[in-house]
Amino acid sequence: MTTYLARRLAASLVTLWAVVTVVFFLLRVAPGGPFDGERRLTPEVEANLRAAYHLDEPLVAQYARYLGMLLRGDLGPSFRSKDFTVNELIAGGLPVSLTVGGLALALAAGLGIAAGTGAALARDGPRDRWLTFAATAGLALPPIVVAPLLVLVFAVTLGWLPAGGFTTPAHAVLPAVALALPYLAAFTRLTRGSVAETLTAPHVRTALAKGLPTRRIVARHLLPPALIPVVSFLGPAAAALLAGSMVIEEVFSLPGLGRYFVQGALNRDYTLVMGTVVVYATLILVFNLAVDLLYSRLDPRIRLGRTGRGG
Amino acid sequence: MRYLALVLSAPVLLAGAVDAKVLRIGNGGEPETLDPHRYNLRLEETILNDLFLGLTTFDAHGNIVPGAAERWSVSDDGLVWTFELREDGKWSDGQPVTAGDFVYAFRRLLDPATAASLAHFMYPVRNAAAVNAGELPPTALGVRAEAPRTLVVELEQPFPFFTERLIYPTGYPVPAHTVEDLGADWVKPGRMVSNGAFVLDDWQPHAHVTLRRNAHFHDADSVTLDGVRYLPTADSYAAFNRYRAGEIDAIGDFPSGEMDWVRKNLADHLRLTPLVSIMYLVFNVTRPPFDDVRVREALGIAIDRKLLTGRVMQSDEVPSASLVPPMVPGYRSAVAATGTRDARLERARDLLGDAGYGPDNPLNVTLRYISGDESKRVQVAIAAMWKDIGVATTLHHTELKSHFADLRQGNFEVAQAGWFGENNPEHYLNLLVSDTGDVNYGRFASAAFDALMDRAHAEADLARRIGLLREAETVGLAEHPVTPLYAVTIRALVDPRISGWHANPRNVHGARYLTWNER
Amino acid sequence: MNDLFRHAALGNRWSRTCFLALCTVIVLAILVPAVSPWALDEVDWDAIDQAPAAAHWFGTDGVGRDLLTRSFSGARVSIAIALLATGVSVLIGMPYGAVAGFLGGRVDHVMMRIVDALYALPFVLFVILLIVVFGRNPYLLFIALGAVSWLDLARIVRGQTLAVRQEAYVDAARALGAGRARIVLRHVLPNVLGPAVVYATLTVPGVILAESFISFLGLGIQEPDTSWGVLIADGARTMQTSWWQLVFPATLLAVTLLACNVLGDRLRDALDRRDTVRPTPVAARDASA
């Protein structure tokens, strides 16, 4: 297990390096630079700026400089937020994104697994019908409609919750709900399908034949294997939540990572984009590692770290 | 260019007891810096204008009035300006503001090591361009402190609009004593020392910039607000919702689609202000067929500005056939749109026919614009107008950075552009001077136009100078290098409990003049 | 299996309705832009921001263009993007996941690390960067979206394969000397089809939603062409004053997604019917009692 972990961590670092490299060079290929704007810059001024940010060095030297800084945990100065370093910006934005994203993921996965299991166990009844319908309908509502609608109803009209900003826990509620809805629906559908299928597995049938209590069958025999595809959806869902958060953070004016990223990409703030990518990538790698560990807990047939082939 | 960061400065305050007198203002975006020498955005000017006091400043109506300088005089040749600083000018740490602070600031601005993005605003000062290029040391700059409160500035050429140029943050003083001690950290909240009506209290990136009143300000007694909180409301739709939910007291922009609703429901909040600015289309004259003046004129006259502003925009934008915004004082352009729409379309078709285009050989145009809701509506409408003269338009939008990068590199056929800032004609006409550099996006070059502009720049007499500018515009626009469209209108919402907010064409509303009236 | 899902998929009448609705949307998407008196980019200067009326059944947008025409032109683009991207994702993701899961060991390890690496690139960044670098091209959008959506599918299929390959019948097949390719083809792929189809049905709405995100950020299809994402992003901003600009495209999109999802379930149902490897189903009511 320890070797397995060490290997996974090493592989993660290589992955991180690859991501950093691809994004670094891709960004430099994009037209426009961090100092283009509507106002005029003279060649002298632009040369001064480029020198101040080492943009006048050869690309490879800049790349080496960046990797060196990264190793020291320094993400560099922001090109656009000139009074802050990227580390400072991310220290401010990450907690916001993690709060909203974590809340959304908990809502989506928690409620989704419960609803999906409930639906699968009640296959014929009205409960299944309504849950399935609601989940299907939930997938059909784009967040770009739901989020402004939530603001209009709960903030502007009813005045129950804030419309934007992030200063109190109440500020996280509407964004998290808007972010969670499509994934709640996806989790419900996925769980329902998987649980229904597991109901036909031999060990579950045996348990049923033995007349064990339903609750125990569900907890012991049904859910662990049934949740495998659901758990493997957690990784993608977490990544997608991060992506979705860019839109949500825009709608709710949240000072989060997604907003930094979008603004950074649009403004060619190279260091800020690189910084957010590094953080995103690290989060996702860690999360996927956790998911894989969970995987092996759920299905003892999967043994981690095996090098042998076949069965 | 409202889509950018243009914005607003309007004010507001909160109804609750806790935050009383801290006005919450939507500022249209996140400031990149609060260092007056490194700034680049209009929205930063709004904050810096509250933090600092330049030699000249704005009054509540946006007029230019004495600021840190009490009075000034100009030599007869227009080259030497002498400013007398006010006796009671103080930094927020109680230190006096001296002529030496200004000398230090001007040198710092132009020092290549500062990498100031708008250093060229001060190029009228003698040797400024050479200093900024690193050819001369900062001490060679034409500024000196003749006495602790007497500042002398020498210019390269007469520049009657210099007091206007000084209202930009590039002309603000910086506290030499803290900048030297703290280096780049001098702008951090808690450390920043400034000489305006307010000082920096807190800055949470992408959340807010909060200012509190400066007790050492010379006119502190007239300031009624305890503070101002600027919010980075980049999305006008989100800003509008937050305004309606009572979370913001004033916003400088809301979605144009909401105009009817606002007129009906928030009529006493609505403040429409034509901004001194010009939106225009620019033709790349180096790229066929746009090197043909007939093609440019045909495309230009096919556009119906009134239809654009009256039906599509609906926010009382001011149509303008002149490249100089119509509200610039003392300038009456000789360029005007003439004839009925039908007559103009007829002429446009004839021009295209002469240039070799017609139903069998339609002209194809790629029109580039900046991504954004309002900008899209305008370009779509223009494409529809061109369709009326048989032109097939491909629309191509990119975000701001790429748009301007491409324009500056001449990588376009026809493109949307905009210019704003100063309230004088040459600020706009300089865009067409051949050696202006890459903001002359279309690479227009006319010897006759350049000659008239050169004569104007050397002229110290204001009336004659303006006469030459007017002549130059007529000559230049006859070649149709650009099609001016309209002056932008700022659609602000201001809580009616705020007094002291006066509409003005520069859209400046210093927080020191604003008052919250609890009812 | 069969019974179970026939009931679960909300009954036959419901799925027939969905099928009809989907066909209607597709037929209208083909017909309406072709027969409409208004062109996609034609401005009616006298009817800017107009509510539905005789001349404009769906009303007009903020520039005075006919929304009926634009909604169905947008349908063409959105459906095309979704189909292409989903096709790309299934074509890449399914074989990829099945092979990784079945071969296991080092090959699986390397293949999944590659997937992880691609995951760790937030996809909106990926798409934004591609758009910024190569300009705005709808085909690029398909490729980018397809190229990022296959990752999910690959993981799901791989997870399922990992479990399946250790089933007794796979061991039996191996013991009988079946080749690896044959085992993958005959035993593994049929078993991962179910989850794959379910996931593909999640991919269609996913792609349409992703397209709407990108449009919302202002990076979508170029005017005057349009898509549901562009129309909805515009409509969501004017929902209070000009409801029709949101309601019509959003309804079309919702109906399409709903129908796709329901039909996806039915398709899975049909696939399971062919499934001969599976043990016979437990009677549905036993487990829920």
Image: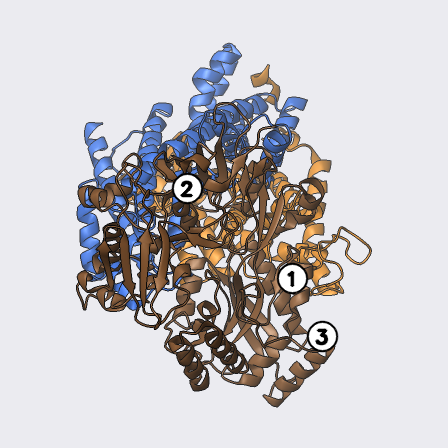
Chain colours: A blue, B brown, C orange
In the shown orientation, is residue C176 left or right of residue B243? Answer: left
**Same subunit: marks 3 and 1:** yes
Location of the C terminus of chain C (image quadrant): top right
Which of the numbered marks, if any, corresponds to residue B341? 3
Report helix, strand or loop for mark 2: helix
Q: Residues within 10 Å of mark 2 (few under 14, many from 20)?
A: many
Q: Residues within 10 Å of mark 3 (few under 14, many from 20)?
A: few
The three-letter amino acid code for the residue at tag 2 is Gly
- Circle 2 residue: A258
- Circle 1 residue: B309
Provide residue C4's location: percent of width, then percent of height.
61, 28
Chain letter for the residue marked with disc 3 in the picture: B
Location of the N terminus of chain C (image quadrant): top right
Task: Identify which residue, B163 or C245, lies in the foreground.
Answer: B163
Task: Identify which residue, B318 or C35, lies in the foreground.
Answer: B318
Question: Disc 2 versus disc 1: distance between alpha carbons?
Answer: 35 Å
The three-letter amino acid code for the residue at tag 1 is Thr
Chain letter for the residue marked with disc 1 in the picture: B
Residue B475 visible? The answer is yes
Question: Disc 2 versus disc 3: distance between alpha carbons?
Answer: 48 Å
